[in-house]
Amino acid sequence: MILPKTEEEIKNIRKAGKIVAEFLEKVEKLMRPGISAKQIDELAWEIAKKRGGHPSFYGYRGYPASSCVSINNEVIHGIPYKEKILKEGDVVSIDYGVIYNGFHADAAKTFIVGDVDGKIKLLVEVTEKALLEAIKFLKHGVRTGDLGNVIESYVKKYGFSVVKEYCGHGIGRELHEDPPILNYGKPGEGIVLVENMTICIEPMVCAGSGRVKVLKDGWTVVSEDGSISAHFEHTVRVGEQESEILTQ
Ligand code: MF3
Ligand code: CO
């Protein structure tokens, strides 16, 4: 049984979401050649702590950092090693979650360092737009299959592929709650989403096939064909008519 959140619970998720949003806004200034993923991660830790929260990824199933920094062919869960140095033309996906007063919020954004070719710019734009289209479509009564279909159809129009092996999720007292929010699906299928459920929608999109594998570090998910990928995520409250982004 998936319960909608109470007003009080949503307030806490919204507060956690503000901290996540603050980080994703501030981190943009660090997106330049020569900066290490570790420096990005330090900012992630600092902002959570300064605002009275805690970075929820830290220690999650043994994850060793506060954020995920995934570069180019890395799709998600890239570990922010100090040896990972940003360079001109990198496509950098940053994923971050905060727990505040017992409640989580989680979001991700892909940044471009300097300049890249038009197709890669389009990949990043389309991934963000797919997320925004899904949020626009989401309201009381929508099924997870409807939502997944909106995302995948949008992405396919541009010749890109969604990653099917990972998905979005419900969120609240846990970072990952039911239901799974797939980035593909058939209209009319899946679970019915109702007002005040809180979910994370997170399209992961590759320029190539969309098939992925996990590196030997046990975390980093890369595209199997080495193609560039992008990832955007928001924590969203399902609204009666219009849904609310909690991570902005
Ligand atoms: N941010 C991921 C998600 O959206 C979870 C990261 S897992 C971690 O679900 F281990 F890296 F924390
Ligand atoms: Co998530």
Image (tube, rainbow, N blue to C red):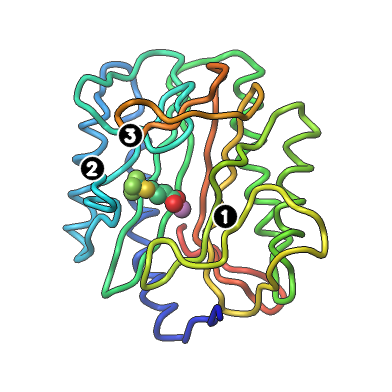
Q: Nearer the viewer, mark 2 or mark 3?
A: 3
User: Mark 1 touching mark 3, by CB under 8 A?
Assistant: no
Residue 65, label in figure: 2
Q: Earlier in the sequence, mark 2 or mark 3?
A: 2
For the residues labelled 1 and 3, the Cα–Cα distance comes to 24 Å
Q: Nearer the viewer, residue 53 or 153?
A: 153
Badge 2, how many Cα within 10 Å: few under 14, some, many 20+? many
Looking at marks 1 and 3 on the same chain, the residue that comes earlier in the sequence is marked by 1
Q: Characterize the local packing of mark 1: few (<14), some (14-19) or many (20 or more) Cα atoms within 10 angstroms.
A: many
Return the mark for residue 16. Answer: none
Answer above or below: position of 65 versus 22.
Answer: above
- Point 29% across, 29% down: residue: 217
Q: Secondary structure at mark 3?
A: loop
Q: Return the disc, 1 or 2, that comes first in the chain's sequence.
A: 2
In the foreground, 206 or 126: 206
Q: Secondary structure at mark 2?
A: loop
Q: What percent of the width, then of the height, locates residue 231?
A: 52, 38
Across and down, in percent, residue 98 comes to 31, 59
Q: Can you tell which quarter of the image residue 189 is in? A: bottom right
**Is disc 2's CB within 8 Å of ligand 1?**
yes
| Residue bearing mark 1 | 201
On the image, numbered disc 3 is attached to which residue?
218
